[in-house]
Structure formats: structure tokens, C-alpha cells
Amino acid sequence: MRKNLSQMNKKLAQAAGNIQPTEDQMKQFANLANQYGGMSPEQMEKEMKKLAQGFSEKEKKDMIQKLHMLKQMSGLLDNDQRRKVDKFIELLSK
């Protein structure tokens, strides 16, 4: 797992330029991916709406930025995961 986090951290750093995520942030991404990986689209949307309600506007903007960076990393997400990220970005943008 540590090697995967290190590789993800490198890819995120390349995609984000000057933004340097911490190891803790990378662990959070990995935990979220594991936690929500097996949900149906309907379950995922319900959970995303619930999460989005608890975010401040600043937190929403920060999360949207991170999700865009995540999408830019080639080979990290499959098509289904990209669609879920897009849906979450859409919900956070409302």
C-alpha cells in the first residue's frame, strides 16, 4: 500500500504542478476509493449529496480542485470511476 501511495503522490504532484499533497491527503483519497468502490450509482449519488451538504463553499471549491487533479492522472481511474468523480464534481458545484 505504501508504494501505491507514493506512486499516486508522484502522479498527483506532476498533474498539480506546485500543489504538493501530503501523505495524509493521499491516504484520504485511497480510503475514499476503497469505501465507495462497490456502491451502485444510486447509492453513490445519495452518499455524495449527503457529504456535499456538510461542506462549506471553500471546502467545496477545494474538493472540486482535487477531484479535477485526480481525473487528470492517467491510468489511476477507470471509466466508471471517472463518471463517479464527474458526478461528485457536478453535485459539489450546485
Image (spheres, helix red, strand yellow):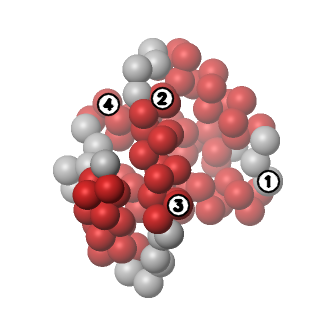
The residue labelled by disc 2 is 36
Badge 3 vs badge 4, beta-carbon distance below 8 Å: no
Q: Which residue type does callout 3 highlight?
A: Asp
Where is residue 29? Give x, y as percent: 47, 49
Residue 24's label in the rendered image is: 3
Badge 1 element: loop
* Mark in the foreground, 2 or 1: 2
* Mark in the foreground, 1 or 3: 3
**Where 5 falls versus 12 (above or below)?**
above
Quadrant assignment, res 54: top right
The residue labelled by disc 4 is 80
Q: CA distance from mark 1 to mark 3?
A: 21 Å
Earlier in the chain: of badge 3 and badge 4, it is: 3
* Mark in the foreground, 3 or 4: 3
Badge 2 element: helix
Badge 4 vs badge 1, beta-carbon distance below 8 Å: no
Q: Which residue type does callout 4 highlight?
A: Asp
Badge 2 vs badge 1, beta-carbon distance below 8 Å: no
Earlier in the chain: of badge 4 and badge 2, it is: 2
Residue 56's label in the rendered image is: 1
Q: CA distance from mark 4 to mark 2?
A: 12 Å
Tag 4: Cα neighbours inside 10 Å, few (<14), some, or many (≥20)?
few
Q: Residue at x 40, y 20 (%)?
A: 38
Badge 2 vs badge 3, beta-carbon distance below 8 Å: no
Residue 70's label in the rendered image is: none
Badge 1 vs badge 3, beta-carbon distance below 8 Å: no
**Where 37 falls versus 17 (above or below)?**
above
Tag 1: Cα neighbours inside 10 Å, few (<14), some, or many (≥20)?
few
Badge 3 element: helix
Where is residue 93? Give x, y as percent: 64, 48
